[in-house]
Image (cartoon, rainbow, N blue to C red):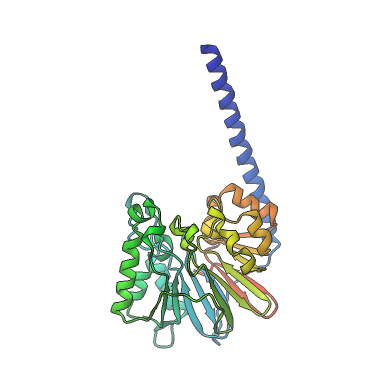
Amino acid sequence: MKNKKKLIRVIATWLVTAVMVSVFVLDIAVVCINNKLAFETPIAQESFGDDNTADRIHFLNTANSDCILIESNGKFALIDSGEGNNNPRRKTAYKGYEEEVIAYLKKHCADTTGKVELEFILATHMHYDHSGNFLPIINDRDISIRRAFIKRYNANSTSDIDSEAWGNLDTYNKIIEALNQKQIPLIQDLSSEDFTFGDFTMRFFNTETPVELQTGENNNSVGVRVTKGSRSAFLAADFTNRDGFEMIYAEEIGDIDLLKIGHHGYFGSSSPDFLRTLKPEIAICTNYIGKIYPNVKWNLTMVARVPVFATAHRNGIIATFTEDEIILSENIM
């Protein structure tokens, strides 16, 4: 009996080891293929002009957090803010990017007096790696915000770990309080209709989370489609395919050229069906390549054949929209 149990343990160990080695080898192969695809996609050093007519999406390097600046014809808007400096998850807190984000805004969005005006800010959801840095941005004396889009927080739609360990409600309350103190107009009933921002046409998705999907804060994420002419990008916030969430909106989002990968490339994001429906030609990940889950890399590289560019390795990425194409630039920070 003991020998039989020992044999079973040995076989199980070898099977697990074989699976782990296979995943490791496949992951390396997928990264190599992705590097080849990325090499075939032109990428340039960004040169900021002074005419204020460019149409760009700036994906800032805030490690594995989201901070996206929209620029169009001299107007600026901020979608998510990056990781703040005071993460409630003290033991697992990542480095904050308060100084870097504010410095970037003042370097690239300021007028001749050094003042920054943001047409709007959007908090896609209340996870700290998306909204934790809004408080210092709102309170900065050199930054003005014309309006803020923030969905009402629904404590009943979040998991225990969201509400207790991640401090979502506290983050939400502090942002709302700061907006009220600065008398910044707050829009909580988000429209799902197209609206114009400079030369872009934009649209919010998941403005009201379906009741059956209210199973975690990521499912409250607001996705954003940005279009100029025939070119479009979809900024997927923390969209994953949990509960079929991606496919609820895939057909409505439609064909795009650039995908900001949902949930930093973690498990459950960028499902094959989602990618086949959106048909992106470029993928941007707000993370490190090595932190993207192997199955997500596989879906992007082997299923969709899409080159993936990681902001943490490229030190930030800009997607500049022209009438005919999207031009990528790196090393923007």
Q: Is residue 244 visible?
A: yes
Q: Residue at x 67, y 46 (%)?
A: 29
Residue at horizontal 63 percent and vertical 37 percent from the top? 22
Relative to 233, does residue 17 appear above or below in the rendering? above
What residue is drawn where x is 38% and y is 58%?
Answer: 156
Query: Eyeballing the image, is 250 above or below 179?
Result: above
Q: Position of residue 290 (x, y in %)?
A: 55, 50
Question: Is any atom of residue 63 visible in this view?
Answer: no
Q: Of 214 and 241, which appears nearest the observer?
A: 214
Left or right? Give the position of 39 relative to 244: right
Q: Position of residue 60 (x, y in %)?
A: 49, 67
Image spot of residue 142 (x, y percent): 35, 81
Instruction: Give how far across and how far down residue 72 sits, in percent.
Output: 55, 82
Task: Describe residue 279's horizontal placement relative to residue 127 as left or right.
Answer: right
Instruction: Report which quarter residue 21 is drawn in.
Output: top right
Number of marks present in the image shown: 0
* Residue in front for this viewpoint, 278 or 91: 278
- Nearest the viewer among 251 and 60 is 251
Query: Would you identify the image quadrant in which residue 81 lies?
Result: bottom left
> Position of 30 compared to 129: left or right?
right
